[in-house]
Image (cartoon, rainbow, N blue to C red):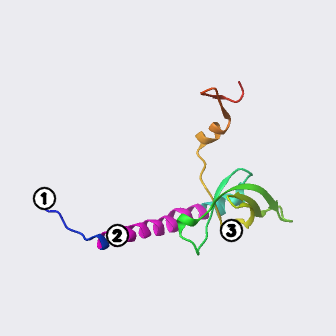
């Protein structure tokens, strides 16, 4: 088995190129797909307070995109919400829904929200 010798600079460039390729594909395929599904979903089912979203920002790399939680929705005169307040690490921020991608929710996580931690045991909040 022959080993290929790669100098440090070439190795770094290769890793950097792979990293950029991954994040470019992730942002274009996964996040854009979420946003497309969201456009259809928002017509049928509105976001609700507590939903998690990611702010899609063209001028930033995907690792810099911020996570946020829906705080309050503002319906227009036609009853359709186009703007909402979001809780971020910076505080509450108002943003249009056209630049927001809701993150998929695992149904198992919703049941976790209804549980409490009591004395080393995880139990149902209804007990």
Quick one: quadrant of the N terminus?
bottom left
In this rendering, the answer to whether 47 lies above or below 125 is below
Question: Which residue is situated farthest in the front direction here?
Answer: 8
| Mark 1 touches mark 3? (CB < 8 Å) | no
Mark seen at residue 98:
3
Determine which residue is flagged by label 2. 12
| Label 3–label 2 contact, CB within 8 A | no
Residue 95 falls left or right of residue 74: left
Q: CA distance from mark 3 to mark 2?
A: 37 Å
- What residue appears at the point 43 percent right and 70 percent down from the top-left corner? 20
Q: Nearer the viewer, residue 75 or 15?
A: 15
Secondary structure of the residue carrying numbered label 3? helix
Q: Nearer the viewer, mark 2 or mark 1?
A: 2
In the rendered structure, which segment of residues is drawn in magenta? Answer: 10-36
Q: Is residue 28 visible?
A: yes
Residue 29, image x, y percentages: 50, 65
Q: Which residue is mark 1?
A: 1
Is residue 27 located in the magenta-colored stretch of the structure? yes
Label located before the other in sequence (1 or 3): 1
How many dots with numbers? 3
Using residue 7 as the reference point, say whether residue 34 is left or right of it: right
**Magenta span contains residue 17:** yes
């Amino acid at each position: 088995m022959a080993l290929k010798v790669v100098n440090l600079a070439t190795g770094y460039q290769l890793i950097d190129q792979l990293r950029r390729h991954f994040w470019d594909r992730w942002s274009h395929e996964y996040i854009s797909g979420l946003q497309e599904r969201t456009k259809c979903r928002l017509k049928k089912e509105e976001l609700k307070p507590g939903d998690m979203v990611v702010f899609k920002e063209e001028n930033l790399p995907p690792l810099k995109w911020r996570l946020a939680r829906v705080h309050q929705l503002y319906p227009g005169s036609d009853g359709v919400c186009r703007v909402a307040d979001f809780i971020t690490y910076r505080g509450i921020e108002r943003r249009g829904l056209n630049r927001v991608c809701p993150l998929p929710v695992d149904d198992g996580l919703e049941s976790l929200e209804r549980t409490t931690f009591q004395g080393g045991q995880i139990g149902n909040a209804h007990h």
